[in-house]
Image: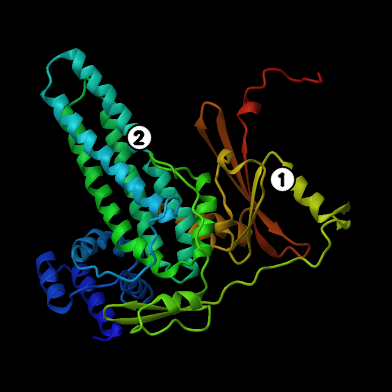
Amino acid sequence: MMSEQRIDILKNILLDLHNGASAESVQEQFNQHFTGVSALEISMMEHELMSSDTGITFEDVMGLCNVHANLFKGAISDVQVADMDQEGHPVYVFKQENLALRGALLRIRRILEQYEQMEEEEVRDQLLQGLQRQYKLLGQFDHHYTRKEKLFFPIMERYGHDAPPKVMWGVDDDIRLLFKEARKALDTLPDGDIETVRQTFEIFATEFEEMVFKEEAILLMILLETFTQDDWLQIAAESDAYGYAIVKPTAKWVPQRVSFGEIAEQKDASSVPQASDPNVRVIDTPEGQFTISFTPKEPTTSVLDPASPQPFGNGYLTLEQANLILNHLPLELTFVNKDDIFQYYNDSHPVEEMIFKRTPSQIGRNVELCHPPKIVDKVKKIFELLRSGQKNEVTMWFKKDEETFVYVVYKAVRDQEDQFQGVLEYVQNIQPYRELDSDFSREI
């Protein structure tokens, strides 16, 4: 069957679900037409659904996400991908985290069962302490999700897979909220209702386990079919900034460097060789081949000598001095240009100490894609107010913890002709200023 027909049938199946068809009838339809489906087709199908005039939005696809997963279970065909089982490779680490997180789920289920059956107060106290430790470990899944969202998704978007990140990020946020509810229920013990604790945990666990399936059977397949060694190396280099869930890399991944030509030679003699153009990838699936082409962004290089003083504001600075000054400001600066592209951030703090963590992977993304779907409307509103001139700046603040009170300013950047050039965001911890206890201090 031609790939276009397969995508069209898959699209119609999800449209049937959207319009109220039962899961059973859709399952029968799926079984009738397919013996397997590749992860790449899933991505293409979702992209087509969201970009066509069917009226289906990414919120609709998000609502259908669990239904897709159930349909695809047992029907996802094996795709020829590189062996990514080496220690330290981002995929290896990602899967090890999922194993550890599943282990935490099992331990929590076991302790909840014991707690419910136990009558001795002293033993129940010990079990409760064990539950609290396991919930804390399980909560590290947020590092796992954040790495996925901040490092995997930007590269997926560059290859044209912009639908799966939007959908999956929305589901991630739903799961985060479910965990907060489960955690809140746990905090009611020992006086609270153990059955409520169990129910809230199982609601979370069901969605969490579904996400593990989507990550390993769909997401990672797309990535392994599409990403290059350089992509994976960039992810590995930036992963520490966002942390890990329960387990950490035990070794640094150092791949054997291969060219596209060498990859083609390693394939089966019966396979069609990869395209000679390094910007074109030919992907084999059991039902045929897909060709992915993309235009890489040319690196921008400055023609200025970094050590040569240049006219700068009211004086002269070298590029090196300007960069050092920006990096020494006690502010996290981010600049999004007039085309809504995230163009710059400074290094005022080590990335692990940043209030809003930034890494090079995010440079070049549309600002909307840099934020969780649930706050995209707020981001759009801020840019609309600043771009139109209704406001010159928008401020926000919140208490992050006992030592951090975050103050955020979004400021319109306009040139001498008052033309909008973008938005400057600066973020600062103002807790030390809130603690000042006198009207002046001039001591050295």
Query: Which labelled disc corresponds to residue 137?
Result: 2
Label 1, secondary structure: give it: helix
Vertical placement of 265 versus 258: above or below? Answer: below
Q: Distance between the residues labelled 2 and 1?
A: 34 Å
Along the viewing direction, whichever of 72 and 315 lies nearer the viewer: 72
Q: Residue at x 59, y 56 (%)?
A: 360
Q: Do the residues labelled 2 and 1 touch (CB within 8 Å)?
A: no
Label 2, residues with CA under 10 Å away: few <14, some 14-19, many ≥20: some
Vertical placement of 412 versus 124: above or below? Answer: below
Q: Mark 1 points at which residue?
A: 327
Q: Which amino acid does label 1 sit on?
A: Asn
The disc, 2 or 1, on the residue closer to the chain's N-terminal end is 2
Q: Is residue 186 left or right of residue 89?
A: left
Label 1, residues with CA under 10 Å away: few <14, some 14-19, many ≥20: some
Q: Which amino acid does label 2 sit on?
A: Leu
Name the quadrant containing residue 47: bottom left
Along the viewing direction, whichever of 318 and 258 lies nearer the viewer: 258
Along the viewing direction, whichever of 145 and 231 lies nearer the viewer: 231
From the image, which quarter does the N terminus lie in? bottom left
